[in-house]
């Protein structure tokens, strides 16, 4: 009964998951707490418990925007100062890793016959790159692909 109620009201479910995760994140046990990560675990639990719940399309995009914004706000003040210290060397290393990963992903996709969306998802997931994943999802949607390709 409560399951059907929440599945039919996805925004209420979203806020309930956030609130529940926040509460569990504040619980401190022997000096250990999950913090904001508890919201992630609450969301995973809700997804397992309510597989029929589907959030509106704007929710993942809003989450990505908020994530990128908060990362920018957190790292913005020290960005230019870090470039003066070891930033150029570190950025060159990161660029090398991204390019090497792209070449490796392309090679693996060709060798194993992976589709373009699968290879793009592999690249984005391997580098934990949320903006790249969002770009892939948007390009798949604009190409008219859905369902299995987006999965």
Image (cartoon, rainbow, N blue to C red):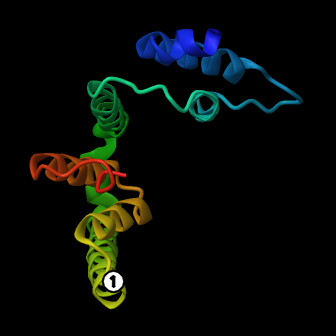
> Considering only vertical position in the picture, is 58 above or below 68?
above
Q: Which residue is at the far left?
A: 143
Residue that appears at 44% across and 17% down: 10
Disc 1 residue crowd, few under 14, some 14–19, many 20+, Cα 10 Å:
few
Residue sitting nearer the eye, 19 or 137: 137
Element marked by disc 1:
helix
Name the image quarter holding residue 18: top right
Q: Position of residue 133 (x, y in %)?
A: 30, 52
Residue 129 left/right relative to 29: left
Badge count: 1
Residue sitting nearer the eye, 130 or 118: 118
Residue beneath disc 1: 104
Q: Position of residue 48 (x, y in %)?
A: 62, 35
Name the image quarter holding residue 98: bottom left
Residue 30 left/right relative to 81: right
Residue 146 left/right relative to 111: left
Q: Position of residue 15 (x, y in %)?
A: 49, 13
Residue that appears at 46% across and 13% down: 8
> Considering only vertical position in the picture, is 56 above or below 133?
above
**In the rendered image, which quarter contains the N terminus?**
top right
Residue 18 left/right relative to 41: left
């Amino acid at each position: 009964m409560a399951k059907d109620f929440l599945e039919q009201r996805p925004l209420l479910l979203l806020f309930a998951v956030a609130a529940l995760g926040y509460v569990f994140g504040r619980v401190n046990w022997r000096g250990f707490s999950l913090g904001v990560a508890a919201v992630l675990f609450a969301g995973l639990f809700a997804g397992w418990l309510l597989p029929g719940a589907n959030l509106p399309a704007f929710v993942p995009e809003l989450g990505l925007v908020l994530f990128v914004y908060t990362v920018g706000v957190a790292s913005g003040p020290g960005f230019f100062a870090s470039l003066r210290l070891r930033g150029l060397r570190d950025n060159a290393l990161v660029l090398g890793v991204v390019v090497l990963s792209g070449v490796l992903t392309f090679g693996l996709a060709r060798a194993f016959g992976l589709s373009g969306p699968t290879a793009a998802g592999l690249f984005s997931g391997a580098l934990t790159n949320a903006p790249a994943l969002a770009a892939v999802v948007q390009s798949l949607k604009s190409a008219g692909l859905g369902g299995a390709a987006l999965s």
